Image (tube, rainbow, N blue to C red):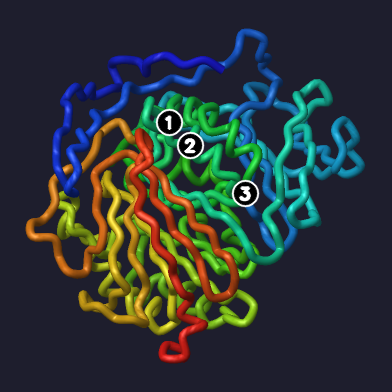
Amino acid sequence: MGFSGRPKCYVLAIFVVFVGFVGADDYVRPPAGRSLYASLSDDHSSTSPQQVHISLAGNGKMRVSWVTKETTPSTVKYGKSQGKYDASNTGTSSSYKYIVYKSGQIHDVVIGPLEPNTTYYYKCGLDSSPELSFQTPPAQFPIDFAVSGDLGQTEWTKSTLEHIGKTGYDVLLLPGDLAYADFYQPSWDTFGRLVEPLASQRPWMVTQGNHEVERIPFIHKERFTAYNARWHMPFEESGSSSNLFYSFDVAGVHVIMLGSYTDFEPDSNQYKWLECDLKKVDRKQTPWLFALVHAPWYNSNSAHQGEKESTRMRDSMEALLYNARVDIVFAGHVHAYERFTRVYKEEADKCGPVHITIGDGGNREGLATKYKDPQPDLSLFREASFGHGQLRVVNASHAQWTWHRNDDKQPDSVWFTSLASDSACVV
């Protein structure tokens, strides 16, 4: 896989060096990164798998997704020893059209049951395909999450992925804005190639952002065509009617992925599903409860203020999350990092969730460097830099959150106590 610049006709080049001071340091804000184009190797054939990524698909199962240019078997062979595959499963394949673009064959195969915390070796499609490997998450604490939003395809994206790859994470959480294709469908292919080295080894759990909508009035009326076709998440397994909102359990954590760009009012399918999903949560089995959205509900950055996807969604759903004692809400959209105190209805509340914005993965639009001044009391740490987050859930009561700037070791690190373990917040 090689890298080159994205075709110039589809790029808004940004050559502004952002200089700002959010903290007390003299750190110079980096400019937006050069766009990358992840190309195929010269020996890659039309039947070879590309853009391989995996995701959790219910208890002890994993979904394997990949693309081929030509039709090949939608079969995954796998086993616990290199070159020895004692199990296999066959799934489905599909393709989609977007104006004049036609995708390759998108393969979707669920394999399992799998043992926890175990390395599996696998092949996608033909026997001539290369052997890959992945590791399943642990069945119990501790578990490590990588968290990064608004990734895109730039030199900063590459830096973020390199840093994440060194963390030894178990599951990656992505709160929307993946490829930044913005109607140019080949960018979905290049994004899949860019993230494959990591996404084929550990499960990536994603939700959608505004850059995934890709609806063009009168020309392409369907929303999320590419996203839904390429990034199939376990919505069926969680009783959801849409790939835009779902949930999953992993190692004592219940994670809820919500859709900022689909209906969220009390009469909507998403609201009714969320209400039902939260009622099923057993905090004895999953003492930690996280939620992800794209548009942040709390934000002291000047960017994206007053958008309905933030304010109206918060007005509609905040009480549901509060009453369920959700521990942390992750968001993207704003191209910066910010951590709030526990909050509910715009006031500090020790039984409310911590809100964290982490839309600093590497997008081509650059950083959101302007903040409200003075810093609100609810906002504990904010920084406009490209970076990534690590969340290590140590046990049923304690977890450590660390945010890192990509280009130095300046961190924000804090310990959280689960609301389920706080007698003052038990409901």
Q: Disc 3 vs disc 2: which is toward the camera?
A: 2
Residue density around tag 2, few if under 14, some if 14–19, many if 20 or more, within 10 Å = some
Mark 3 residue type = Ser
Query: Which residue is painted at 57% across and 79% down in the image?
Result: 281
Task: Give the image quarter of residue 90.
Answer: top right
Among numbered discs 1 and 3, the one appearing first in the sequence: 3
Residue at the disc numbered 2: 163
Residue at the disc numbered 1: 159
**Whole-number angstrom distance, CA of label 2 to CA of label 1:** 6 Å
Query: Which residue is painted at 68% across and 61% down in the image?
Result: 58
Residue at the disc numbered 3: 55
Q: Is residue 222 visible?
A: no
Are circles 2 and 1 on residues that touch, CB within 8 Å?
yes
Residue density around tag 1, few if under 14, some if 14–19, many if 20 or more, within 10 Å = some
Query: Which residue is painted at 64% across and 65% down in the image?
Result: 141
Element under disc 1: helix
| Above or below, 269 relative to 150 | below
**Whole-number angstrom distance, CA of label 1 to CA of label 3:** 23 Å
**Whole-number angstrom distance, CA of label 3 to CA of label 2:** 20 Å
Among numbered discs 3 and 2, the one appearing first in the sequence: 3
Are circles 3 and 2 on residues that touch, CB within 8 Å?
no
Mark 2 residue type = His
Are circles 1 and 3 on residues that touch, CB within 8 Å?
no
Q: Determine whether, in the image, residue 282 is placed left or right of residue 37.
A: right
Mark 1 residue type = Ser
Residue density around tag 3, few if under 14, some if 14–19, many if 20 or more, within 10 Å = many
- Residue 266 placed where, x, y %? 35, 77
| Above or below, 232 relative to 122 | below
- Residue 367 placed where, x, y %? 23, 39
- Residue 397 placed where, x, y %? 54, 75
Q: Determine whether, in the image, residue 104 is placed left or right of residue 376.
A: right
